[in-house]
């Protein structure tokens, strides 16, 4: 069944300054910042220019036979290509050379040189391209975490997920459709870690996912040059309507003590949340010792206590 709930629109704002962005950020809702100076990349970053400047750098990519990528069940493979070859393939609908078939899709989420130790930063991994892009200077430089260079084939759809840091999605080339869900909708999104199990968000299998259409849904179409502010914990699903080139800039909007300093990807849950989940896992294991009737009863009691204590304190 198609999604029956009409999505809400995302505000599009012009002439945003550093001072006015403070109010936007504190509102904790996504917003499109249009008309910002993102540098010469909007004009320069054609496939030909990207191939020439990115050159022979080898990159690790996702290759998928289907447009809807599933990170839970891994319906894609990891392969390596020269950056120039990736750009050539991703900007073409049908391939002469391919891994799976001629209509396969490509996705680059650039990594640090050593992903175990280095964060992704377009200024480090792609310095010749980074000179063309300007990040919004709306957050303190010391709060910067990463800048992730992304390339996607036309039609590619990324899984619905959330991030634990605020970020700007700077759309450089191609149009994108972005569907967002509020953090309060987590109960309806059928989560597996930080990802939703629901791949086709426009044609919901209501027998399998009967609650999904209750989610608080937003939708926006990004043009080249747009900057989408995505607050932490907001779920987002991204569809590249055309050959897409973008850069995400993540920053730590909370105190350093909340983040795992060994997390080079920036996608691990905040440390207190991680510890709470460990406690919950131990509690579940302990409840497994009970007969089924008692296990069900005390699990329901625990859920009720969490709702009354944690959720009440967070809204007061």
Image (cartoon, rainbow, N blue to C red):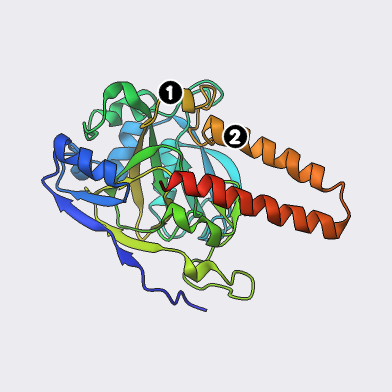
Mark 2 to mark 1 CA distance (whole Å) = 15 Å
Q: Is residue 143 above or below residue 187?
A: above
Q: Position of residue 247 (x, y in %)?
A: 34, 40
Q: Position of residue 23 (x, y in %)?
A: 21, 42
Q: Is residue 285 visible?
A: yes
Taking the image as shown, residue 218 lies to the left or right of residue 265, namely left
Which secondary structure lies at badge 1? helix
Query: Which of these two is toward me, 125 or 207?
Result: 207
Contact flag, marks 2 and 1 (Cβ < 8 Å) = no
Which secondary structure lies at badge 2? helix
Q: Is residue 181 above or below residue 78?
A: below
Q: Position of residue 172 (x, y in %)?
A: 27, 46
Disc 1 crowd, CA 10 A, few/some/many (<14, 14-19, 20+): few
Residue underneath mark 2: 274
> Which residue is pictured at 14% across the width and 43% down the height?
16
Taking the image as shown, residue 223 lies to the left or right of residue 213, namely left
Mark 2 vs 1, N-terminal side: 1
Q: Is residue 165 above or below residue 298?
A: above
Taking the image as shown, residue 281 lies to the left or right of residue 168, namely right
Residue underneath mark 1: 256
Query: Which of these two is toward me, 104 or 158?
Result: 158
Disc 2 crowd, CA 10 A, few/some/many (<14, 14-19, 20+): few
Query: Which of these two is toward me, 160 or 18?
Result: 18
Taking the image as shown, residue 199 lies to the left or right of residue 140, namely right
């Amino acid at each position: 069944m198609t999604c029956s709930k009409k999505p809400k629109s995302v505000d599009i704002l012009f002439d945003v300054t550093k001072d006015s962005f403070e109010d936007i950020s504190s509102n904790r809702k996504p917003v499109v910042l249009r008309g910002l100076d993102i540098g010469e990349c909007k004009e320069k970053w054609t496939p030909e220019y990207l191939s020439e400047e990115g050159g022979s750098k080898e990159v690790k990519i996702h290759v998928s036979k289907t447009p809807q990528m599933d990170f839970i069940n891994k319906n894609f493979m990891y392969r390596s290509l020269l950056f120039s070859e990736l750009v050539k393939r991703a900007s073409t609908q049908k391939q002469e050379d391919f891994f799976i078939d001629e209509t396969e899709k490509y996705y680059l989420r650039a990594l640090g040189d050593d992903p175990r130790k280095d964060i992704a930063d377009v200024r480090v991994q792609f310095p010749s391209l980074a000179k063309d892009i300007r990040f919004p200077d709306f957050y303190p430089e010391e709060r910067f975490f990463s800048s992730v260079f992304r390339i996607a084939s036309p039609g590619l759809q990324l899984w619905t997920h959330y991030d634990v840091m605020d970020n700007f999605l700077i759309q450089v080339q191609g149009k994108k459709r972005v569907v967002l869900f509020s953090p309060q909708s987590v109960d309806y999104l059928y989560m597996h870690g930080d990802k939703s199990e629901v791949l086709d968000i426009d044609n919901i299998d209501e027998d399998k996912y009967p609650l999904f259409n209750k989610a608080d849904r937003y939708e926006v179409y990004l043009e080249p040059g747009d900057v989408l502010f995505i607050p932490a914990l907001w779920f987002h699903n991204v569809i590249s309507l055309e050959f897409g080139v973008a850069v995400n800039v993540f920053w730590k909007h909370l105190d350093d003590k909340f983040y795992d300093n060994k997390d080079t990807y920036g996608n691990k849950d905040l440390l207190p949340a991680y510890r709470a989940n460990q406690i919950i896992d131990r509690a579940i294991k302990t409840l497994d010792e009970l007969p089924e009737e008692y296990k069900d009863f005390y699990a329901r009691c625990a859920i009720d206590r969490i709702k009354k204590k944690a959720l009440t304190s967070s809204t007061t």
